[in-house]
Amino acid sequence: MPPMLRPTRAEISLGAVRGNLKKLSATAAPARLLFVVKANAYGHGAAELARLAEREGLAYGFGVSCVEEGLALRAAGLKSPVLVLGSLYPFESFVEAINSGMMVTIASLDAARQVIEASRRLGRKAECHIKLETGMGRIGARRPSVLKIYDELSSSGAVEVSGLYTHLSSADTDPDYTGQQLSIFGETVSDLEQRGAKGLTLHAANSAATLRYPVSRMDMVRCGIAAYGLAEGFSPAMQLKTSVVFIKNVREGAYISYNKSFRADRAMKIATIPAGYGDGYIRRFSNRADVLIGGRRCRVLGNVTMDMTMVDVTGVKEAAVGSEAVLLGRQGAEEITAAELAGLAGTITYEIVTLVTGRVPRVYVE
Ligand SMILES: Cc1ncc(COP(=O)(O)O)c(C=O)c1O
């Protein structure tokens, strides 16, 4: 590994993640906690956080979006159950998943046939969770198809059907719709029980549902965002920090950044920090977001560039090359939250942290 010289880094608090996972488990109990670590644990580093959870027994297993993410966990030495939440395609995905002992999502009759064939070929039973569509409109089989899928899988003798689940689209915003989704789920469970299904792990809840709707917790909850501290009452795990690398004083009328996107209306002191959209600090923050320097909020000036961003430090006497700059997180009494950045960018907190690119080293702190 080359030495880490550029000061830009994402500091990830293991203590925060540990506390968040414990709180989720305590809330969900007796339901088990599947720690959703897809998309590199929403930018926080999947292998590192999965290791923490496995080492300390903080989760039953891990939810990933695709087989590659599960393989990366296995390559990192993780032995816990892994559920692939996405629809598996192409056929080789089933083979790889089964070989690595991952649980797979089956959301269509076609996928059911493929997993049976892959299991037969490998002489190893795939563990399957059937995905029911109840209103998310993404992947999932509707109620009548789920019954056919269940019959096909269970009569094959080649695979084990161990779970049934659905995904709630609006648990954070719409109680009525969430109730409707849960009703469809409950009716489908009754149908399956009438067909003799027993011992299925039933799950529906994401973080929002786990926290709001006890009935949604069933046998297992699948939580991501709250584990990363981006839900009320949880501790944010990620901070994005760097240091000032250049300082200048400019006269009134000076232009800053591409396309003259800021014009100084007075003499100003300006800091340049080595972080930009190449790090996931998106261009939408241009002239909008604040950065913390010297414990104060300093406005981004002009367009955020790929690798550097300029910041107004006119009021921060002590600002100098080497001063710490916080793009996301706390400094002194001030804090820039993911919610604040999401609001400025017209997006959600999930996207703010997930967008932090691979160029940014993740540094784990207690
Ligand atoms: C199928 C599924 N379950 C659970 C989650 C976790 O959701 P959250 O991060 O809101 O807890 C996700 C994430 O979007 C998901 O796609």
Image (cartoon, rainbow, N blue to C red):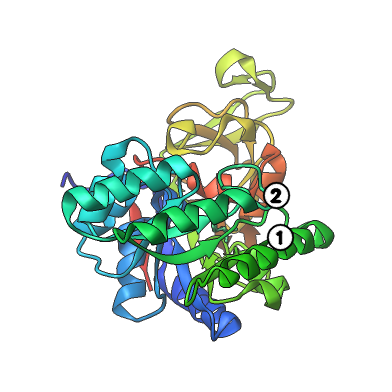
Residue 307 lies in quadrant: top left
User: Residue at the location (47% across, 66% down)?
Assistant: 163
358 vs 304, nearest the viewer: 358
Residue 128 shows up from this direction = no
Please say if 44 is above or below 186.
Answer: above
Q: Viewed as shown, does residue 94 lie left or right of 194?
A: left
135 vs 49, nearest the viewer: 135
**Mark 2 / mark 1, whichever is N-terminal:** 2
Q: What residue did someone put label 1 on?
A: 184
Q: Image quadrant for the C terminus? A: bottom left
Q: Viewed as shown, does residue 142 lie left or right of 241?
A: right
Q: Viewed as shown, does residue 237 lie left or right of 267?
A: left
Label 1 is placed on what type of residue? Ile
Q: In the rendered structure, are the residues bearing label 2 and label 1 in contact, judged by CB atoms less than 8 Å apart? A: yes
Label 2 is placed on what type of residue? Gly
58 vs 18, nearest the viewer: 58
